[in-house]
């Protein structure tokens, strides 16, 4: 509760002094908020009447209300020495404690005053405001109601009561007791006839609760009761945010444009700032970066070091993946104000994007030192730490094709982080396959373990070693498995994987029986852009122990139509060539070309909330050319549907259907179905202990 809402005492008692008319001008200054003039006036009076109690009281009030709270307290303290039993002096001294924000002292002092005079309106209201500042809202409400019993409908008391309600609701909101906060705000809205502040607080609460429809209704109520253009523009700003949270970015921009175009001289300064801010945000959400940058530059010329403008520029640079520039702006915000919410949590998000995870967690935790239990900060820490929490991922699948091959597979993966930089990796796979015509059967077991280590924020090494043992129709063997790779982010919006992988051809029983070892050198390169276009390229060079070799090139050009859920379309092209052709054993053309168009729809499981569904669907069709044969049409369908039971447990079913040439044959149809479960267990590991530190 801001102390500006504390009571202003009546000065009727001064009429008892014979020279009251001489001080009428000074009283007028006080009543009309002209505190500097009042201070000068009563200082002059005291030069002639230095011991006059009324003049001293008025001078003390003028000094305090003019911003010199400490000096006012001294003045009233001296008055108390001279008039220790004067209740009016006591009331003024109590108020000076509020001016000095000495709320604990004020609480003890007002407790005595309300005992001394239980019907004193100033004492009751002063005590209520003291308790409100101490966030003891239930007691504050009790005493403000007692004050209103003495003076029903008093404007100062009603104002205090409203802010007690708002403060109490905010306290509940910060404690994430949302239903209780909602109840308090609804009561406040009812009691104060759709008060603007109460409605805005209620709408904001619904946004935090993700109750977007209720937020919209609340803004609608504010629009109906609004009395000025500022309130109407505020409603439009709220509507724009709601549309953004619903993923309707174009509508958000259209709504924000209406608000922006409505700005005029009679609009409150704070609303003008909020509207300009929302409009630039809407431009950024819609990737209209050039226009957003131009507006930001114009405002920076006017206000070069304002935090809200720096935060907008930082946000723009985040969307453009200019994370270092964004970090510089957030650092400047924190130089200006170390307690800034945007500065602290914004910096945390940028540090996360830069791969500086420990620093990101520290920045978010610092945010909580200023904003206790704040939802965005606590969720940020929770979600980031979840990335470094042990998990198990299990998958069971059944596959079959028109070559009479069947396979059953169980795959178990575990990841155990020691810190944000070091993880232990483990995998065990059991697979059995057979041909229903030849009755050729094979079983394999594969186990591997390794480490993932973040060498630099933009470079991660991953290495696993393992063995596979197989029992086939004519051959039992054990072979080494290996996979070593570097994931590099060479430039913004670009990723590069380079690696080596040793594996066994195990698609069907015949291949497993032949013990064909593949040594792969590979590279994956992906380029994204700020205008929704992306390009992925993959290259494999494979050396086999049957003295054959393979070159494989795959490239995909895609365009992101939507972000939530992700929807993209694109073109894929694949080229394969083998040094030797052994078609009787496996698909090994001298040249193979395939092209397809595809559509991919994803609701990412990683951003899906608990108790919600997630899904993925890929549909593709195209043509393939094998050697000099006539072209063949192809199709491919992949999908999964899952449910997130909690932040730690999810499950999904999946399936694939394709007729694209495989490692075994051309002109075949392949089908796979299965189920997968992921379970996150244990606690997050974000710091290496001294034994494990590198």
Image (cartoon, rainbow, N blue to C red):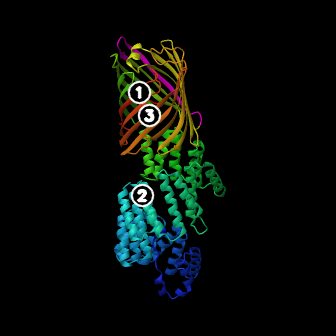
Is 230 left or right of 417, judged from the image as shown?
A: right
Q: Is residue 661 magenta?
A: no
Give the number of the disc on residue 213.
2
Residue 211 in percent (x, y) is at: 41, 55
Is residue 284 visible in the rendered structure shown here? yes
Question: What residue lies at 49% left-to-right and 29% top-to-bottom?
Answer: 633
* Closer to the camera in the image, 351 or 201: 201
Is 417 left or right of 543, judged from the image as shown?
A: left
Give the number of the disc on residue 637.
3
Q: Which residues are magenta?
A: 469-491
- Disc 2 or 3, which lies upstream in sequence? 2
Give the number of the disc on residue 670.
1
* Residue that sits furthest to the top in the current view: 474
* Closer to the camera in the image, 281 or 618: 618
Against 174, residue 133 (above or below) is below
Could you tell me how far apart the alpha carbons at marks 2 and 3 are, in whole angstroms? 36 Å
- Disc 3 or 1, which lies upstream in sequence? 3
How many residues crowd around disc 3 within 10 Å: few (fewer than 14), some, or many (20 or more)? Answer: some
Is 635 left or right of 149, judged from the image as shown?
A: right
Against 131, residue 683 (above or below) is above
């Amino acid at each position: 509760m801001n102390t500006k809402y504390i009571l202003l005492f009546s000065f009727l008692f001064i009429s008892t002094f014979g020279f009251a008319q001489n001080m009428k001008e000074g009283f007028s200054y006080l009543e009309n908020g002209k505190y500097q003039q009042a201070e000068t006036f009563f200082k002059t009076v005291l030069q002639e009447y230095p011991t006059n109690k009324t003049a001293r009281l008025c001078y003390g009030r003028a000094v305090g209300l003019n911003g010199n709270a400490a000096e006012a307290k001294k003045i009233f303290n001296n008055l108390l020495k001279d008039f220790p039993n004067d209740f009016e002096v006591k009331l003024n001294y109590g108020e000076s404690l509020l001016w000095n924000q000495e709320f604990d002292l004020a609480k003890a002092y007002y407790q005595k005053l309300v005992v001394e005079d239980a019907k004193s309106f100033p004492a009751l209201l002063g005590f209520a405001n003291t308790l409100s500042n101490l966030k003891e809202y239930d007691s504050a409400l009790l005493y403000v109601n007692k004050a209103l019993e003495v003076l029903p409908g008093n404007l100062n008391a009603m104002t205090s009561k409203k802010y007690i309600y708002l403060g109490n609701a905010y306290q509940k909101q910060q404690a994430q007791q949302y239903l209780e906060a909602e109840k308090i705000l609804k009561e406040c809205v009812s009691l104060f006839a759709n008060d603007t502040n109460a409605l805005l607080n209620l709408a904001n609460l619904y946004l935090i609760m993700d109750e977007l429809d209720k937020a919209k209704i609340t803004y609608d109520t504010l629009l109906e009761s609004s009395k000025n253009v500022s309130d109407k523009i505020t409603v439009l700003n709220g509507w724009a945010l709601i549309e953004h949270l619903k993923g309707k970015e174009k509508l958000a921009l259209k709504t924000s444009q209406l608000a922006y175009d409505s700005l005029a001289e009679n609009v409150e300064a704070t609303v003008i700032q909020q509207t300009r801010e929302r409009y630039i945000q809407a431009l950024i959400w819609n990737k209209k970066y050039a226009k957003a940058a131009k507006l930001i530059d114009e405002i920076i010329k006017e206000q070069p070091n304002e935090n809200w403008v720096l935060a907008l520029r930082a946000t723009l640079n985040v969307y453009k993946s200019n994370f270092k520039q964004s970090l510089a702006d957030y650092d400047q915000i924190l130089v200006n104000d170390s307690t800034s919410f945007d500065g602290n949590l914004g910096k945390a998000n940028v540090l996360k994007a830069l791969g500086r995870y420990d620093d990101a967690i520290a920045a978010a935790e610092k945010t909580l030192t200023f904003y206790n239990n704040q939802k965005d900060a606590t969720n940020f820490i929770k979600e980031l730490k979840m990335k470094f929490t042990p998990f198990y991922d299990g998958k069971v699948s059944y596959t079959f094709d028109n070559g009479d091959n069947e396979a059953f597979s169980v795959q178990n993966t575990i990841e155990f982080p020691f810190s944000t930089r070091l993880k232990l990796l483990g995998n065990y796979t059991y697979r059995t396959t057979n041909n229903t015509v030849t009755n050729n059967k094979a079983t394999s077991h594969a186990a591997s373990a390794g480490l993932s280590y973040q060498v630099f924020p933009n470079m991660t090494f991953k290495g696993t070693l393992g063995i596979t043992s197989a029992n086939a129709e004519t051959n039992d063997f054990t072979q080494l498995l290996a996979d070593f790779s570097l994931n590099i982010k060479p430039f913004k919006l670009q990723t590069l994987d380079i690696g080596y992988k040793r594996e066994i051809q195990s698609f069907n029983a015949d291949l497993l029986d032949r013990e064909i070892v593949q040594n792969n050198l590979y590279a994956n390169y992906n380029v994204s852009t700020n205008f929704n276009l992306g390009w992925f390229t993959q290259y494999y060079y494979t050396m086999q122990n049957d003295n054959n070799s393979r070159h494989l090139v795959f490239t995909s050009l895609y365009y992101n139509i939507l972000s939530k859920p992700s929807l993209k379309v694109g073109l894929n092209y694949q080229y394969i060539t083998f040094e030797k052709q052994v078609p009787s054993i496996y698909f090994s053309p001298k040249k193979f070309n395939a092209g397809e168009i595809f559509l991919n729809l994803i609701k990412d499981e990683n951003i899906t909330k608990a108790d919600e569904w997630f899904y993925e669907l890929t549909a593709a069709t195209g043509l393939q050319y094998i050697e000099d044969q006539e072209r063949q049409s192809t199709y491919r369908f992949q999908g999964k549907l899952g449910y997130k039971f909690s932040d730690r447990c999810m499950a999904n079913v999946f399936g694939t259907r394709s007729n694209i040439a495989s490692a075994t044959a051309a002109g075949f149809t392949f089908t796979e179905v299965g189920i997968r479960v992921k379970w996150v267990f244990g606690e997050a590991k974000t710091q290496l202990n001294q034994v494990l530190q590198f």
